[in-house]
Image (cartoon, helix red, strand yellow):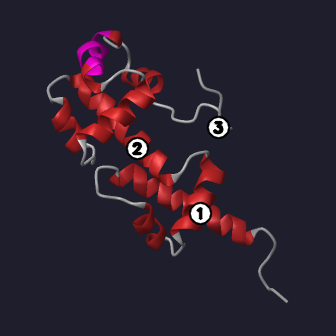
Amino acid sequence: MSTTPPGSERLRDLALLRRVRDRIDREYAQPLDVEALARGVHMSAGHLSRQFKAAYGESPYSYLMTRRIERAMALLRRGDLSVTEVCFAVGCSSLGTFSTRFTELVGVPPSVYRATAGDAVAGMAPCLVKRVTRPVRNREAPGPARP
């Protein structure tokens, strides 16, 4: 007979998933892969991927790429770095993959975004800029209402 209270394993898993998400948020520019993230919380990569997607609506890799693109958008709005420099600054190792993912999430290629985005948010408070420019990969995922 198990001595573990009902629901405590689920709470433990949610705490581990939060640690993974926090690590991605902190270390987005570092080389991260699902296997390394899973090892950090003593899970298999498959189990981590399934649990993460169930909890957050997207896979750990998708979440990582969304964070990288979010940071890339901020760097591109500054306008002082090239698209290639931004690509490597956010932890992407392939300009092609970066451009494809960026276009997928934002709707325009990074070079177009760089040329036009600064004017679109000029004069806006930084907290609002972050809110209105945040990329969202899976708009159909359950979660808080989006503007």
Mark 3 or mark 1, which has the lower sequence index? 1
Please tell me whether mark 2 sits on a helix, a strand or a loop.
Answer: helix
Q: Is residue 45 magenta?
A: no
Mark 2 or mark 3, which has the lower sequence index? 2
Quarter of the rendering occupied by the N terminus: bottom right
Tag nearer the camera, 3 or 1: 3
For mark 2, what is the residue?
65
Q: Residue at x 32, y 29 (%)?
A: 73
Report if residue 123 is visible in the image: no
Q: Residue at x 42, y 22 (%)?
A: 107
Q: CA distance from mark 2 to mark 1?
A: 22 Å
Q: CA distance from mark 3 to mark 1?
A: 21 Å
Crowding at label 2, few (<14), some or many (≥20) Cα neighbours within 10 Å? Answer: many
Crowding at label 3, few (<14), some or many (≥20) Cα neighbours within 10 Å? Answer: few
Please tell me whether mark 1 sits on a helix, a strand or a loop.
Answer: helix
Q: Amino acid at mark 3?
A: Ala
Q: Residue furthest bottom?
A: 1
For mark 1, what is the residue?
15
Q: To which quarter of the image does residue 112 belong?
A: top left
Region in magenta = 112-119
Report if residue 27 is visible in the image: yes
Residue 64 location, x and y as percent? Answer: 42, 48
Q: Is residue 95 left or right of residue 52?
A: left
